[in-house]
Amino acid sequence: MESLRFLFVGGYMASRRKHTLAEVLGPLEAEIMDVVWDRGEVTVRDVHQNLRRVRPIAYTTVMTTLGRLADKGFVRRVEDQLAHRFTPLVSHEQYASSTVKSVIDWLVQHFPEPAVAYFVDRVEREDEQVIQRLEEAIEHRKDKGQWT
């Protein structure tokens, strides 16, 4: 995505905003982005109809939220037709990766021992092979002199 090179500077959104991707999506924004990611290109009406199936929501709320998502750099607003269209500028995978990185970085920075211990316990409950691969990665880094 060519546009992402413009959006990100040193891991942050364009200079107008100093937030990482993980810090800027609220619950409604995330719901709307799920629709945008699923469809690729949407109008306010498309999103409104989709969300309205699950719960009542005002058209103007969807319109305002899509505008905010455009301001934050998550979607591009295309204004060449009567109904504005919106396309994603950030993929779901990019957002998920950024969110996980931000949360884990914060936890490890503020609570290193309990954060890592919990992570290892949690991963171990899912798949013991993952623990084996983590141990191998740690040994590999030690062998390369990346960790002392």
Image: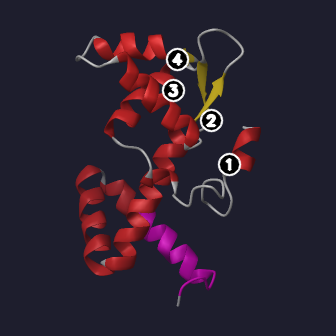
Count of number-bearing discs: 4
For the point 43% across and 68% down, the residue is 105
Three-letter amino acid code at disc 3?
Trp
Three-letter amino acid code at disc 4?
Arg
Label disc, if present, on residue 55 of the rendered structure: none
| One can see residue 91 in this view | no
Q: As rendered, which of 105 and 148 lies closer to the eye?
A: 105
Residue stretch in magenta: 132-147
Label disc, if present, on residue 7 of the rendered structure: 1
Residue position marked by numbered label 2 in the rendering: 89
The crowd level at tag 3 (other Cα within 10 Å; few <14, some 14-19, many 20+) is: some
For the point 59% across and 23% down, the residue is 86
Residue position marked by numbered label 4 in the rendering: 39
The crowd level at tag 2 (other Cα within 10 Å; few <14, some 14-19, many 20+) is: many
Q: Is residue 43 above or below residue 32?
A: above
Q: Is residue 139 above or below residue 26?
A: below
